[in-house]
Amino acid sequence: MEQWRPFGDELRKLRGHESLRSLARRIGYNAGDLSRFERGIRKPPADIVRLLDRELSASGRLIEIAAVAMFDLDNGRVDGHDESGRDYPYENGEGEFMPISRRSFIAAVGMEAAIGTSSNSRIALNRNSSVDYLDHFRQLKRVLVDQDSLLGPTTVIPIVQQQIQVIGQLRRLNGTDTTGLLEMQTSYAEFAGWLHQDSGDFTAAEYWTDRAFQWSMASGDETMSSYILNRKAHLSGDEGDGSETVALAAAAIRTAPGDTPIEALANMRAAHGHALLGDHKATENAYNIALESVDSRDMDPDLPWAGWFDHSYINVHRARSLSALGDYHTAAEQFTHVLDTLPPHYARDRSVYLVRAAIAHVGNDDVEQAASLGMEAISAGSGSGSGRLAKELELLDRAFTPWQSQAAVVEFRDARRELLV
């Protein structure tokens, strides 16, 4: 962890005379972990780097130092921990720093420079290279997942779409693992769909998610096909189409392999679809099935979704569905309970959930609390590049219309106008 000492030194200097406990309270984080960051013995999560940089008015300095430590080229790796196995998608865009060799990193940079941005660029397979192309794309995607978490989806989308093109060209060359590359292209297309969904471009999200589904079917990857059906249900739910959400979730449930949590995820998506259709009973039944299914699964802790798919994740979506059903009182209570259990470093998703909680409080006529939550969401999500957050804030702004003259609402609206997402 030697490479993180400059980050810790800069953090300590920026903190000045403020106590660690005071800073921890200000950003909603653990003081003990902040101390470990300052001593350079623990790697800070990407969203906490952004949060600290903003709260301490570092003007990008902490982000810059963290990026240098992350890539740590002098030691020939990207800081992180070992992970093996296939490259499963990330549901919420949050990632971890992953190990990558100096050779692979330089190969990634070299490939970007050689290809450029032209859609007509052609590539040639270097058959003398010792780089494993599949491993290269797998590790590059992990870096891009982290960049999304650190700097937002708009900084990643052009690179991801370019890599989809590159992988497609490699598939057409003799002597390559065409099946493996097709599966990799599927993974990148699914990721592109999520990035566009998070940025608020649902048309592009639908396009790339549909391409991912087409390629998953072509490769015969039943697990990925089922997962992408779940992702399509997720997208339809965000677009407010209850019927389509239920239908897609049902398809995901039918095709979900028994050794994955995809069935539980799909039941959760179906539940929100039922809520959009106003069916309270079907909503509760589907959420209960999702919760029971999670309890019955012996989740492999090494899979990416093991870190976030649990009761808290299901219940924060359940609260959103209760709000859609008009049960604002119960929704507000559930949001209050669940938000306290979410990992504080998931700043982007947390900011979206905070706004949804605020909307529930407006429905419950608790305008002061709603405005307070809206301000907290603005602070947590500033600079995230999340179109989801911008859309939710717009919905909250509209909900405040009957109380537009109240001081707390005026303060919220002023802060929203100044927000850069």
Image (tube, grey):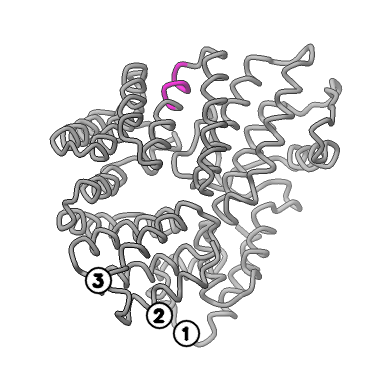
Q: Nearer the viewer, residue 94 or 277?
A: 277
Q: Which residue is most to the front?
A: 402
Residue 291 vertical position relative to residue 171 in the rendered view, above or below: below
Residue at 63% over, 44% down: 157
Labels 2 and 3: the sequence-earlier one: 2
- Residue type at tag 1: Glu
Q: Residues within 10 Å of mark 1 (few under 14, many from 20)?
A: few
Q: Quadrant of the C terminus?
A: bottom right
Secondary structure at badge 2 equals helix
Q: CA distance from mark 2 to mark 1?
A: 6 Å
| Residue 325 drawn at (x, y percent) | 20, 46
Q: Is residue 363 magenta?
A: no
**114 displayed left or right of 398:** right
The three-letter code of the residue at mark 3 reads: Val
Q: Quadrant of residue 252?
A: top left
State the image coordinates of residue 328 (x, y, percent, origin top left).
18, 56
What main secondary structure does the magenta stretch of the protein show? helix
Question: In the picture, which quadrant includes the N terminus?
Answer: bottom right
The residue under the point 66% across, 29% down is 135
Q: Looking at the image, which residue sits at the far left?
A: 281
Q: Residue at x 53, y 49 (%)?
A: 199
Magenta residues, start to end: 222-227
Q: Mark 1 falls on what kind of element?
A: loop
Contact check, label 2 and label 1, Cβ < 8 Å: yes
The residue that label 1 is drawn on is 18
